[in-house]
Each structure stands twice: as structure tokens, then as C-alpha cells.
Amino acid sequence: MPFSFGHPWFLLGGLSIAVPIYLHLYYRKKPVPKDFPSLRLIRLSVEAIIRRMKLRNLLILALRILILTLLTLAFAKPFLGSLFGTTAPSGAPAAFVVILDNSLSMGASHQGISLFNSAKAKALEVLDKMGPYDKAAVILLNDPGTMLFSQLTWDKSELKEAVRNVPLSAAGTNIFGALNPALKLLAPVKNFKRSIYLITDMTNSSWKPFLTTYDLSAIDKSLDLVLIPIGEGIPPNVAVTELGIESPLVLKDRPTPMWATIANYSIRPQKTRLSVFIEDDKKHDISIDLQPNDKKRVTFSCEFKSEGVAHVRAALPTDSLSQDDTRHLAVKVMAPQKVLIIKPPPDREGNITKEDLFLRFALNPLNRSQGATFNVESRYVDETVSLELTRYSAIFLVNQRDLPEPFVNNLTSFVLGGGNLIIFCGSRVDPEWYNANLIDKLGGKYLLPARVFKRVGNAVSKSVAYQLTDLDTGHPAFKIFGTDGNGDPGKAQVYEFFQVKPDSSALVLARLSHGLPGILEEKRGQGRVLFVAFTADTAWTNWPLKPTFLPFIHQSIIGMLKKQGLNSDSILPGTPVSILLQEEGLKKVELTPPHGPAQELPIRKEGEGLIHFSTVLTDQPGFYKLSIERSSGIQTEAFTVNPPPEESDLDRMEIRKVPRFIAIKHTPGGTQTLGDKVALVREGSEMGISLLWILLIAAFLETLVANLSTEVGKKGFS
């Protein structure tokens, strides 16, 4: 460790070591030749005495130089500083940042001691050492990192009060998100002793990814990085790390397969019980045996008795980290979905077309009215005058030549309000009418996700066949085909289709083998429009005869339904949530958190009759309910917040594997407190008293050796 000095100008006294060197050289006597009897023993005795005198003289010289050096260093007030030292002079004020870990893993208790409470106590000890001219700030280590102070402050009481009021977070650990702003706060500070104190439980799950992506050696060497580890050993912990649902669509009064993953982060086997609740009604109580460091997936089934959004909760008995013993899931429960197919009118000879036949079979193969996922109605467009389109989850337009203007207006309102529209082309489609009436005339409320141009191919001769390529297997419509064994839509053949130009915000879900878009989707308001550039029957393609056609139709509608309103999938704590709604009839939107009263959310107009609202009030884990009040009634949406599963792994990294940091460990029964160790890192250890003791010992030895030298000289020549 390098030295620093309280009075460095006294080091000039080190020049005084030249005095004993000069005296030693000046008084050194040259041997004088004398005539002795040529007795060999006398000559040898004299030579031995001279050698001993030279050795003692050199020792006396070294001791005198040491005495003067120690005297100079003592007056210069030396300090044994920290590992990297600082460019600030000794006695300079300190500027430091305390990074306090309040992530989920800090909620663990070990041997009855709360890690988080221990961490807060140590943060207060660090702040207690703050002098009148020091300044500091506090940053939290939970993801994404929270600055409690935007700049360094001299107010010690305010800093300590902020630490006392820090809540435990349900979020993960983000070391970079806290360290980076701490470095920025200290970068412009000059002539201060700068330090960062990181108080954390050292979990592997947070340190390993940080150390693999961040080079600590690149940090300014004049900063002291101090690591204060919390907790000893690894507390045993069992957690619910996942909770999910197998069915893409949950229907009322239908058995719904579900699953949960239970993890044992312990070196010993664990026995536990998983309780599953729908709202507050317990549905399952499952015994689970877990091996050390083992995970087990548990499956079960639930029935939901009412439509709407249901709260499912999977819970374990409380252990060392209670915050991860429960996991939440919001489930949208629906009645069988109504689907309307607008089929093309009879041909000129009055023959009824059957272009909707394959769609009806795909949606409801057995044409059941009870127990089916989709209840299908197939009508001509002139039969829809008295229909309320909002009764349907999805509407299919099959090979329509044109549509009455009132129906187009109703269809537009249906889509913008959250309905789903699927369009199949065919020989009756007139591109000019489609572009003029479904795009241009409607302006910003357009329906088509692409402009329609000429027909490509020849379905009569079938001389050329095209295949579906570049499938977007990340989209719900094609996701099922991303797994081997579930079929390949690319094996179907398309003989004729319409060339289209997608809108800028449209997604191309599949292309035809020469690169032109074949299937597209675009979000319109709260709803979605899916466009297929060929027919729904076998006039232009053989896809309806392939086994992949049915799952494509099902997954397309299910994917649209799941994307309506809020996504009910779980989010991480602190993640913003937003949604677009139609302005018509909207009065207010209220958010009810897991604990506490409902809060009205601010609303921002987006134009075109749409409004947007968002919230960042998602810190608590649990079930959140949104009440959207309209003049026509109240719409309910919901989502859940769950902690990151990696926080449940309390395995700790060895301190020696963390470079650049000075580790301050707690020593039970030790004489030094954390505050003493912080002062040692900040100021170093004053060496003046120790040097004076060494100086006294050196002076005593010098006197002893000098007197011994004289006595030896006298005896030698007597």
C-alpha cells in the first residue's frame, strides 16, 4: 500500500542523512605502517580487529541514517493509504457514493438476521464517518438502478434518513446501472478523496454477467472501490420460479392444463407443498420432493367458472426468502368465441358459392353448437344490416367484390374498437375498389395493411406453383410450425395471388417463393387486420387441403385475441405498462395495485379517436386490475408482476474473484468497527507513532553498538 503524508514538506529533512555519511568518510583513518616483530600471530590479530571495527562502523552509519530517516518521516506524518491511493492531499475532504443493494435477494434472512436490515445498518455506519466538509450520495442497486440524490450533498442527516426509508425491492440486481451513475457523480469532483462503497450480498446471478461484460480495471485508479459483503453462508431457499398455462385460449367451464416450476436452491433435499389458488379459493395442494439444487415442473388442471380476468396464485410455505414463495398469473377467461364469415354472393347464374366451406370446417370441424372453441356464422353482406358486429371476436371477408358503405363504416369501428378482421382474396377482388374504399376514403382509419395491385400466376393452367417461405415463426399464427413435427405450410402450393405493397407498419408474416408478400398483418387501433393474398378455398391454392391450414386459422384468431387490451403475461417489477383505447365514451381509467387504494391514471390523446395511458406503478409483486370506465359500462383488464427467478438463487461469489475492489469484511468480536475500517480506507493508518517507537529502538541500538565498538577497540590494542 502506498504512503501519503500529512506534512510532506518535512520530507526535505531527509537531506540530513548526508551528515553521518560525511562524518563517516571524513574520520575514517588510514592504517599507519608500524614496525612489529615479524610474528605471524600478532599480525593476524591486528587484521581481525580492523575488520571487526569496519563492520561495526558501517552498522553505526546505517543506524544513524535510519534514525534521521525515521525522524524525517515522523515529522512528515505518514499514512498507510488504501489499495489504489488518491491524488487528493491528506486531510482533504471526502466525496463518496454509497450503493445499497435493495434487490429481492437481500430480503433473505439467515440465522434470524435480515440481510437487508444489516445492509442498511452498514450504510448508516459509512455515513456516520462523514465529516463537515464531506459530500455524498446514495444509489440503489435494484434494477434498473435508482439515484436517491441527483447530486452529491453535504446534508448527512438527509442522507441517513433516505437510507432508513429505503424499501426492499422485488426487482433484480443491476450493478452497472448503479455503478455507472456513481462514477459520473464523482468524475467532476476535484481535490476530494473519492470513494464508492458497494453494500451487497454478492450473489453469483448478478456478479457473473456483470464481470463478463464490464472491465473494472478501466475505472479511474484514483477512486477507491470498497466492497462491503453482507451475510455469511448460503441460506437454503425454495422458490416458485415459473407459473404458466398450456392452453392458448382459456374457456369458461373447460379444464385448463397449467404448470409451475419449483426450484430448490439448497445443498440439501427439501420437502414442500405447492398450493394453487384461483382468487382466494384453493384448488390444489401438491406435495413435492426436491433434490439438492433441483428443479421440478408440476402440472395440474383448473376450471374457471366465470368470464373475465382471473387471478391464479401458486404459493409455497414461507422460508428464508419469503418474497419468491408466491407467483401470480392473470388469466383471460372467455366464452366460446363467435366468428362471422362474410361469404361472396351467388354468381351471375345464381349458384351459391362454397368458398367459406374450408373456413367453416377449420373453425368448427364438427359444426357443434356446444363445446366448440369457435361458434361460426356464415352470412352474405346484405344479411349483416341488423347485426351488432361487436358480438364477434373476428370477421372474415372472403373474396368480396365490394361492400356497402354503411357496412365498411361499421367494420372500421369494429376493428378500431378491438375487433379482428381477416381478409382472403379471390377472383372477385377489384384492386381499385379496395384501395379507394378501404384505404384512401377512410384516411387514417384505413383497413387494408397493403395496397392491392395485379394478379400474379395462373390458377387455371397451374403451370407454375409458388410456396410460402420466410415464415415469421415468432408470430402466433406460425409459432406452432417452428417446432419439428408440427407440419410445414411451405409444402402447400399457391398458383395465383395478388401482388401487394405493405404499409410501413405492416408485418409480413409469410412470402411467396419469388419474394412477394403473401400474408400480412397490421395493428389498427385496438384491433388487427390479417390479409391473405390468395383464396380461402382451393380455387388458387391447395393449402385448405393440407393439415397445416386448420392450426393456422386457429392460431391466427387466438393470437389476435391474446393481443387485445393488456398483455396478461407477467412483467418484471418497475416495468411500464401502456395501452391504446378508443376515446369514444371513455370516462376514466383506474389502476388497483395488489396492496393499497385504486389510483386514477392520466390519459393522453393520440388523435384519430385514440387515447393512450401508461403507468410505472408496478413495483409490488402481485395482481393488478385496470378498470376502464365508459358510458356503456366498465371494461376490466389485468396483469401480474413477478420477481425475476434468478434472484432466488442465493449462491454467492467469492470476494477474491472480484477485481479492483477493496473488501471490508465483518469480523465477529473484532476490536475494529466498520466505521474504523472505513476511516482506514479513507485516511489510511497514521504511522507517526509507530515510526517514533522504531526510532527509539534504533537510537538505543546505535548507542549500544557505538559503546561496544569503543570497548572492543581498547581491548584489542591493550
Image (tube, rainbow, N blue to C red):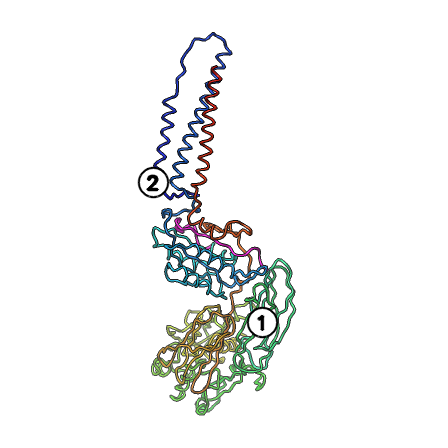
Residues at discs 2 and 1 in contact (Cβ within 8 Å)? no
Residue 292 position (above or below residue 614): above
Task: Give whichever of 631, 532 is nearer the camera.
Answer: 631
Q: Position of residue 193 (x, y in %)?
A: 38, 51
Callout 1 secondary element: strand
Q: Position of residue 676 (x, y in %)?
A: 47, 50
Callout 2 secondary element: helix
230 magenta-colored = yes
Q: How far apart are marks 2 and 1 (CA)?
A: 70 Å
Amino acid at the residue labelled 1: Ala
Nearest-to-viewer mark from 2 and 1: 2
Residue 708 position (above or below residue 74): above
Instruction: Give the residue at x 59% y 75%.
Output: 277
Residue position for label 2: 9
Instruction: Give the residue at x 40% y 42%.
Output: 78
Magenta part of the chain: 212-235
Q: Is residue 346 visible?
A: no
Q: Quadrant of the N terminus?
A: top left
For disc 1, the neighbor class at 10 Å (few under 14, some 14 to 19, many from 20) is many
